[in-house]
Amino acid sequence: MKLQDVDQFEKLAGQLQSLYEEVAVLSKKSPTDAMNKFKLNFINDVLRQANQFLGEKYIPFGHFSEFDADDVPQNSDVVFILAQYLQSFEKFRADNVYRELSSWYWNVKGKEGAIETIMPKRLRE
Amino acid sequence: MVLIRPRITDYHGVPLPQAQLDFAIPFFDEDIPLYVDPFLLWRSPSQQDQALHTSIVNSFNHLNFLLHKGREAEARETLVFASECEEVGLGHSKSRKGVRIGTSKANEILALFHDIPEYGKHGFSHFEEIQLYVRDISADRVSDVCCSFIKSFLIDFTIQQCEELGIPLEQSTIPQLYSYQRNKFLVEQQINLPVHPETKTPIIFVPKRWLRFGPWINFENYFRDYCPRDEIFNPGEPENPVKVLNYNREHYGVVRHYVNAKERTQEDCSNDPLFKQIPVASAKRKLSSIKNLPTGNKNKADVEYENNIVQLLASLLYPDLDFAEAQSRTDTGTLIRDLIFYNNRSIDFLQEINEDYGNRQLVFELKNVKAIEREHINQLNRYLNTGLGGFGIFVTRNPLPRAMFQNTIDLWSGQRRCIVALTDEDLSLMVNVFESKQRSPVDVLKKKYVEFRRACPS
């Protein structure tokens, strides 16, 4: 793992998390309502970057890459997919961190000075 | 190409929905069920509309001038000519044909200038006040008089709109055309106008901002809310409207008071839309009734299903698709209800349906059945073959069974027919987006089409 991957991870994971939280609110209110095209465009943009970042090994579904606006995806569909991506990102983190004393660090190649991160979610729970 | 309830724009391939046009799109074979209300011209902020109202009232009051000069026959003839304006096609006629008033009715109207001194001296400020004195002067008569006196303007408006939209004009004869300059009707005027494709009769457009279901100043409203009934009728006497008309002739002040009140409340007077969507709450109620209906025709469930669907879809798909008609036909002894929408090609999907399948109108066939069967598909396919195009929609309760879905795919492969099904679940999504406004309900139809095309062999 490279230093720029850590940056990319933090950016995408943050975006996915905030999208998930926003859409989860909508979905709670009206799960069967359609997601509008404006939001869908941005969600797809983040998903495309996430797919590229995760690669075949971590991508949640091999046959899903992004939402098709013509399918009129509903709020609950979007929440479902975003939750899967968040899980995949967490799995990616868990596989690329190590513990030293009581802190967790990214496993970055050739980096002098460790980059601290948070504990993998499954260990937190 | 077959067109159900043809409109001039669809006939000439103009892909714009009613909502995007300034005029009410005329039908070829029937009237538009709205009327020109002269009060809307009077209250319009546009100087042009106000000037047109002035010219209408001036033309009407010119009849008084003719009476004063002893030219009664000329006044009567002008009024009779003005009483019908077939070319605009407004009203409730199923044939775009109307009847003029007779000479006795014309005399009755002209007599108002004699009988009521205020009109003889100052003329009318709203000529539709004649409804309050003369029996059987209805909304369409007021509208026709109005259109007749400004027909020349309406012709210019029509020509301008046709040139912008590319609707062809043909030389046609206008039987009577009012000349504001000469204050008389000119006969048999040759003018380039859009025409009915078969009868070649001219068609004139009317701005939709002037249209209402009835005039703002009208007898029913006066009779119900303003006239002093206790003064007109004795206690227990049947309330005969004729007595009110006679009372008005002798009590000009009461009518003036009514007209002043209507002028004061002019802010409440607005044009009526050509189509009004049902409110969201009503759409949800209709969806709920549909979902609770059993399939089949027991207890007339099929009729209730069809009635609910008509109102629901016409509203959900507006303004992307203009509703044309709900119709019934019989195929091999079965009564079939279907809905026809004009294909306005307002979005890419509808454009594709027009180009790939030749649909200038969309057919929605209503089936309150548990499962669509082969015969249902054949019925719809036969109907599409009559020239409606290659794209048809079932509105039914459940998704097509696998074998029937395969049947529709085979129809696409063999005959390039595209038949999709809108189910209760799809209607539910349409109502959801109708409420939330996050997407357009027509997107759900597109979704069904996209799903169908994905399943078709490439």
Image (tube, coloured by chain):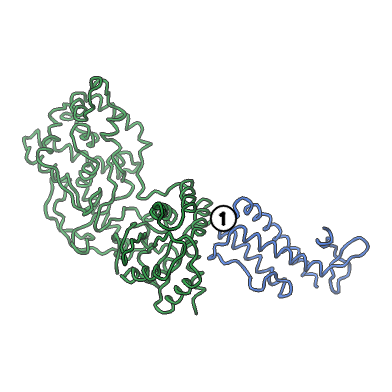
Q: Is residue B80 above or below residue A43?
A: above
Q: Residue A67 at what x, y percent from top left?
A: 60, 66
Residue lying farthest front? B298
Q: Which residue is drawn at 15% across and 30% down?
A: B120
Q: Is residue B191 left or right of residue A30?
A: left
Name the image quarter holding residue A5: bottom right
Can residue A71 be seen in this snapshot? yes
Q: Residue at x 51, y 50 (%)?
A: B435
Can residue B64 be seen in this snapshot? no
Q: Chain A is drawn in which colour?
A: blue
Q: How many labels does the image show?
A: 1
Q: Colour of chain B?
A: green
Q: Which of B350 and B239 is in front in this view?
A: B239
Residue tagged 1: A33
Q: Which residue is drawn at 29% across and 28% down?
A: B258
Chain name for mark 1: A
Q: Nearer the viewer, residue B230 or B22?
A: B230
Q: Residues within 10 Å of mark 1 (few under 14, many from 20)?
A: many
> What element does badge 1 sit on?
loop
Q: Residue B426 at what x, y percent from top left?
A: 50, 59
Residue flagged by tag 1: what amino acid is it?
Asp
Q: Quadrant of the N terminus of chain B?
A: bottom left
Q: Residue B282 at what x, y percent from top left?
A: 46, 46
Q: Nearer the viewer, residue B205 or A34?
A: A34
Name the image quarter holding residue B355: bottom left
Q: Residue A16 at what x, y percent from top left?
A: 69, 61
